[in-house]
Image: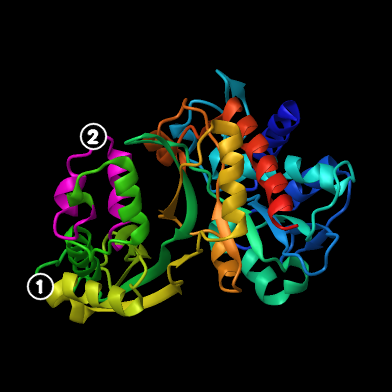
């Protein structure tokens, strides 16, 4: 199985299903064909736009009353900047014990591992579970899921109906006060993507004095927003993780957390600690004007805002207005995508299956629920009452901070041993799931 999963991962990387957010990008049909060839059985394919294909395979269980478990991996990846890579981002190179390429950790490693776990059940090499077992290779996760999981859950629930879900992401272990701690993604922040717009008055660019320049107004607003302290929420998951890691009490104190985060040596770990305790605001796209010698009469910015439980659009708009101060009267706030934070409980049979497989592979049941800073397709299923976790197993070749930097970053890679461990671990989760559901 080890050689199979590595080869499959390499091919999924080479398919280069790059999703830039436009309907014609992605072309996930390439990876649907790869997975169909690997599994040897044709799937149910849903293609809401040309080439934007998701594929569903379902193995019926032996008991119609038993819960259904789904394994879901997305096949699209984000774009790359070639100048930042030391290897071909779509070469799927195997070097120094790593598979290199865009999607290696987000999340083609899991997509490949889940296919390998699912294959014996699909082909009848392993007996069916009490409930159905479903494998979903889904499109468009990297652009809000409207052509993928969102469409399937809203329009084709008959194909993807399930009770429990394993998906992204798989975190590496953290060193706790009493040994390794294994994070399980049980929840995620909610995206409140926002567009800010300012309108000014055009005139010749050689006469800037006293001009109503939309670019200048927006620049001030963006600078103020980026520098303003954001609201803090200390979640039970963060409090528990702080306790497991033996962090000082300041890390779970709303008044002391900012100063505590500044003491962390790893900048990516600090970024994670900040993100899971704060509303985060990241202005990422700014556009203004039409020509260098015309005062800009229009400017806009796209901002990635992520909210914690208890924070909503009201929280977001109030923060923006306060941060922009006097400039706020000139700025129009346009919601782009509002999705509340969501999470799943851990008093479930799937959690028991996860920790039992963890014990088989590590000798430890020390799993801890954590919040993801990013957004996944799990949110669509949680709205239907589905319990969803993201989990896997990594070796120690990539520290936690380096792992976080690989997401949407340069030289994305995953170790061969981590892919092997994750595949074996997930197979164990399914084994234990079958037992706890009987």
- Residue 110, given in percent of the width and then of the height, sits at 62, 43
Report the magenta residues as a range: 252-279
Q: Is residue 271 left or right of residue 83?
A: left
Q: Nearer the viewer, residue 82 or 115?
A: 115
Answer with the quarter of the image where residue 284 lies.
bottom left
- Which of disc 2 and disc 1 is earlier in sequence? 1
Which circle, 1 or 2, is nearer the viewer? 2
The residue that mark 1 highlights is: 210
Q: Secondary structure beneath disc 2?
A: loop
Q: Is residue 259 magenta?
A: yes
Q: Is residue 39 left or right of residue 317?
A: right
- Residue 34, given in percent of the width and then of the height, sits at 78, 43
Q: Nearer the viewer, residue 297 or 128?
A: 128
Query: Which quadrant of the figure contains the N terminus?
Result: top right
Relative to 76, say whether 68 is above or below. below
Q: Is residue 127 visible?
A: yes
Sort mark 1 into few (<14), some (14-19) or many (20+) by Cα contacts within 10 Å: few
Query: Which quadrant of the figure contains the C terminus?
Result: bottom right
Q: Nearer the viewer, residue 33 or 292?
A: 33
How was this image coloured?
A: rainbow
Residue 265, disc:
2
Q: Is residue 55 magenta?
A: no
- Residue 417, given in percent of the width and then of the height, sits at 59, 26
Q: Is residue 15 visible?
A: no
What residue sits 20% from the left and 45% below the top? 248
Q: Secondary structure beneath disc 1?
A: loop
């Amino acid at each position: 199985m080890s050689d199979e999963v590595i080869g499959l991962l390499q091919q999924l990387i080479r398919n280069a299903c790059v999703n830039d957010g436009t309907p014609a990008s992605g072309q996930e049909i390439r990876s649907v064909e790869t997975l169909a060839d690997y599994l040897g059985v044709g799937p149910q394919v849903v293609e809401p736009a040309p080439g934007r294909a998701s594929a569903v395979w379902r193995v019926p269980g032996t008991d119609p009353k038993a819960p259904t478990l789904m394994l879901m991996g997305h096949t699209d990846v984000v774009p790359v900047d070639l100048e930042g890579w030391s290897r071909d981002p779509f070469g799927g190179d195997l070097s120094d014990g790593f598979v290199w390429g865009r999607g290696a950790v987000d999340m083609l490693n899991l997509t490949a591992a889940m296919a390998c776990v699912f294959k014996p059940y699909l082909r009848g090499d392993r007996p069916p579970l009490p409930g159905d077992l479903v494998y979903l290779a889904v499109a468009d996760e990297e652009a809000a899921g409207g052509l993928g999981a969102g469409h399937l859950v809203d329009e084709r629930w008959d194909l993807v109906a399930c009770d429990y879900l394993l998906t992204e992401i798989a975190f590496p272990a953290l060193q706790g006060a009493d040994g390794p701690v294994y994070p399980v993604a049980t929840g995620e922040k909610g995206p409140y993507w926002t567009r800010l717009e300012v309108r000014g008055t055009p005139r010749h660019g050689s006469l800037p004095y006293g001009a109503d320049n939309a670019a200048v107004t927006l620049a001030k607003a963006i600078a103020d927003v980026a520098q303003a302290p954001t609201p803090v929420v200390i979640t039970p998951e963060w409090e528990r993780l702080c306790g497991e890691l033996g962090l000082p009490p300041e890390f779970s104190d709303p008044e002391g957390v900012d100063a505590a985060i500044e003491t962390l040596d790893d900048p990516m770990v600090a970024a994670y600690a900040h993100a899971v305790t704060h509303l985060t605001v990241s202005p990422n796209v700014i556009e203004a004007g039409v020509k260098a010698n015309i005062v800009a009469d229009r400017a806009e910015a796209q901002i990635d805002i992520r909210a914690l439980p208890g924070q909503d659009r009201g929280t977001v708009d109030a923060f923006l207005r306060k941060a922009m101060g006097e400039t706020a009267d000139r700025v129009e706030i346009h919601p782009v995508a509002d999705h509340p934070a969501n999470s799943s409980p851990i008093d479930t049979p799937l959690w028991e299956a996860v920790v039992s497989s963890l014990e088989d592979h590590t000798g430890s049941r020390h799993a801890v629920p954590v919040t993801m800073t990013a957004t996944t397709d799990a949110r669509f299923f949680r709205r239907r009452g589905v319990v969803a976790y993201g989990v896997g197993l990594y070796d120690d070749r990539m520290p936690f901070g380096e792992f976080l930097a690989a997401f949407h970053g340069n030289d994305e890679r995953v170790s061969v041993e981590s892919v092997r461990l994750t595949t074996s671990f997930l197979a164990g989760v399914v084994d234990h799931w079958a037992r706890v559901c009987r």
